[in-house]
Image (cartoon, helix red, strand yellow):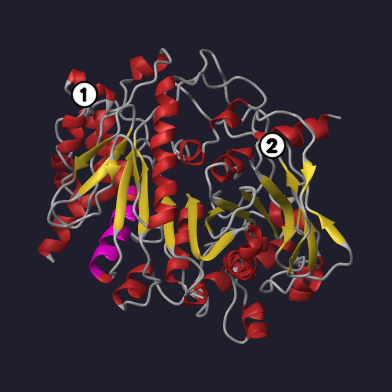
Amino acid sequence: MIGRLLAALALGLGAGLAAPAQAEPIAVDGGQVEGTTLPSGVVAWLGVPFAAPPLRDLRWKPPQPVVPWQGTLHADRFAPECLQPLRGSLQNHYFGNEATSEDCLYLNIWAPAKAAKAPVVVWIYGGGFNIGSASMANYSGEPLAREGVVRVNIAYRVGALGFLAHPALSAESGHGSGNYGLMDQIAALQWVKRNIARFGGDPDNVTIVGQSAGAMSVALLQLSPMARGLFARAVAMSGSPFGGMLGPAPLVQGEAQGLALQKELGAASLAEMRSLPGDRIVAATTPRAPIVRDGQVVTGSAEEVFAAHAQNDVPVLIGYTRDESFRPLGPVTTPQELKAAVTARFGAAADAILAAYAGSDPARAAADIARDATVGRQMADWAAAQRRFGTQPVYAYLFARRQPYVPGVVFSDHDPATVGAYHTGDVPYWLRTRPALNMFRQTRAWQPVDQALEDTMAGALLAFARSGVPQSAPIGPWPALDSRRPRLVLLGEQPAVIPGRTGPTWQSSARPVPKRRAARGRATDGAAATARGDGHAAAGRGWRHPWARRRARA
């Protein structure tokens, strides 16, 4: 009974618990599938296989063609997530317990009733290439499908089961190894290309969307020759292989890490590694670079591929959140602590960086520097490469909304008083899935401004999927980045187009809510701070990029 209730909640996100009706069977690769018509009128096909289960001898092999089935597959429930560590119920992004299995190469489809040549929006989940789920309520496709697009969530192998290079695997393939999770993504997009028209989608109008590792995946798919022709547009939130931080590792490095994992597991051979229980591999602690230059899926660094004009040249919409960082500077409260932390991290460049961020509160400056040196640089360098080496436009945003928390709510991995506009905090606005954050307990006290911001962001995403140009109230059409007059969209309580700086990046720094206000649970952001003189003014001041000066001196 509880399982049925959770399934209804995940399917409808509050749309009601009426029993869904069966949809007409559709012929796809492998056989017939039958979906369900949800109370909202959206038709859903859940747990549709796009490849054979990667089990036993298929572990650490490219995805293989789907195994045909007899009769009609009732695609009315989610498949297991790929084998991974599970989430605790007090985590911020806990959306219920999911089954987990190596048999996980399935996708979920949501479509408007009687759709025909509708834009297709494919979601690629994040999770550091170690966790993630195509069935998580925060990623539900039903809300956007209600607005006329076909939504698809794809699964891919994660952790060492999805991203392991090894000399024996390279010898077996004849060209290299690793990146099996990326191959899964490509196989899923190939399935979409072949089959999505039967669900009312346009196979020539596919937009891929991802966040964090999903955003890195979007960038890697833009780089990969194997993904050519599989998508028409790309949207990435908070992550890329640009910027020299998380780029593809050399194959020889990945193979050495694979040998180290084999040693940790105590396996004598690749065959023995394939016979081990999957949970032993998931529990292993040997460090790995998830993405390697295998020579087929990933052929070079992001910078090299773009410089050779070898990328999949499509319109791109990218950005990140105001208060995220992949490598914080640590606790900083005084100018002296800020100088020490920046000097320890950046060495001889410290004085230039401190000068670029002069005038900010030390804690704010530390957060801005850490953000701009990691995710900010990743996205800014991607934008610069697209402008320089591509023919298609790039659109940029900065998300600055601090979600409004219920007073006193406690998480095991998340402090509402200090997180600000956090990593992943923008996702439920883009996908219209904010109710998922109150799925099992009340954690957010949503306000009218959140609905308005969701309308702005989801509307822009839908417009981009339809036409290649994001637009929505109150912004209108978003400006494409132009090095002569760089502008981006600040997404907060008062969305607005703000200026960036002239030069190689578009980064701007909007101030967050002061910590004393955050502690009281008041939801504000840099845009709403305009009346105090510290919102748009700070954003419009622009960001003086220390790496740009280094390049100029070089």
Q: Is residue 79 left or right of residue 544?
A: right
- Residue at image position (18%, 51%) is 486
Q: Is residue 42 left or right of residue 317?
A: right
**Location of residue 243 in the rendering, given as x and y in whole percent from the top left corner:** 33, 59
Who is closer to the viewer here, 109 or 54? Answer: 109
**Location of residue 459 in the rendering, given as x and y in whole percent from the top left corner:** 42, 41
**Location of residue 496 in the rendering, given as x and y in whole percent from the top left corner:** 25, 35
Q: Upstream in the sequence, badge 2 or badge 1?
A: 2
Look at the image and tell me whether residue 239 can be seen.
Answer: no
| The image quarter in which residue 222 lies | bottom left
Up-down relation of residue 455 to residue 187 (above or below): above
| Residue type beneath disc 1 | Thr
Q: Which mark is residue 10?
A: 2
Task: Report the predominant secondary structure element of the magenta stretch.
Answer: helix
| The image quarter in which residue 389 lies | bottom left
Q: Residues within 10 Å of mark 2 (few under 14, many from 20)?
A: many
Instruction: Find numbered disc 2 in the image and state the secondary structure of the residue it sits on.
Output: helix
Q: Which residues are magenta?
A: 376-388
